[in-house]
Image: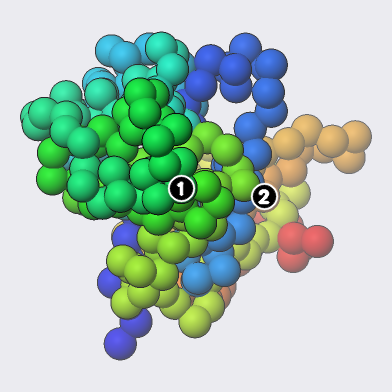
Amino acid sequence: MAPAHINIGCLIIGDEILSGKRQDRHFPKAIEIVRARGLSLSWSMYLPDDPQVITDVLSSTMARDDVVFSFGGIGATPDDHTRQCAARAAGVGLALHPDAKAEIEAQFGKDAYPRRIEMGVFPEGARIIPNAYNRIPGFSIGSHHFLPGFPSMAWSMMEWVLDAEYLDRHRDTPPVDIAIVVRDAPESQLIDLMNECLRRFPACKVFSLPTLVAEGRRVELGVNGEAREAARALDFLKLGVSDLGFDWVPRP
């Protein structure tokens, strides 16, 4: 039996990303990390260093069953709000985590005080995420996992979480993305076919990507899902497109 599906989301936090001062590297790497485990990313969001926005978004995502990775904002500078926002969203207080305290003291000794130790203050009931780079851990609350913004730390920590907590959800093969290119078809005339495909193959996602080229209108019509089921769904779309009188070719 295939492992149960999980929705995986990413929150990427920082004004420096939204202002363009720095280019985000977490989103493409997160796709790579989950794909290596036969999984896929369901959604991603960019958030500012705004405590109200972060708290509101976390309150919403914590009300769902998604596995969420949050990158950034867990330091101790005034523009780092994620630890506090996570606690408010979870409805708990903040406290120095004993395991985080031990890790930070082991790394920095007396220099852990007075500031570095603050990075071990997590929402009550949190679990730590080991940080092999400098031993300042991240933390987890339920299915939400909070990582630093530094790629050299965050990516290995994300891998650790997926392998330590979700190994039973890994798949031998990732979902596939397969499609055809429909020629000279208004996208609106494919909607009923797409809806019927979703009804018949509910485990798959159906997508259409229209473009205008010199040769005319083109629609990339395809499905995403487990390989065998996706192939059946695409065959259904191929027949449907032909029945509608449109030509199609395999996607290059």
Q: Position of residue 163 (x, y in %)?
A: 41, 69
Q: Amino acid at mark 2?
A: Glu
Q: Which residue is mark 1?
A: 107
Q: Position of residue 132 (x, y in %)?
A: 51, 56
**Which one is in front, 31 or 214?**
31
State the image quarter where residue 115 is shown. top left
Is 236 drawn above or below residue 23 in the view shown?
A: below
Q: Secondary structure at mark 1?
A: helix
Query: Would residue 19 be found to the left or right of residue 100 on screen?
Result: right
Task: Give the residue at x 59% y 62%.
Answer: 177
Q: Quadrant of the N terminus?
A: bottom left
Task: Give the residue at x 41% y 74%.
Answer: 170
Q: CA distance from mark 1 to mark 2?
A: 53 Å
Query: Would residue 28 be found to the left or right of residue 191 on screen?
Result: right
Is 19 drawn above or below residue 228 in the view shown?
A: above
Q: Which residue is mark 2?
A: 220
**Which one is in front, 206 or 83?**
83
Q: Earlier in the sequence, mark 1 or mark 2?
A: 1
Query: Would residue 122 be found to the left or right of residue 35 on screen?
Result: left
The nearer-to-camera label among 1 and 2 is 1
Q: Is the Cβ of the residue at disc 1 closer than 8 Å to that at disc 2?
A: no
Task: Give the residue at x 60% y 22%.
Answer: 17
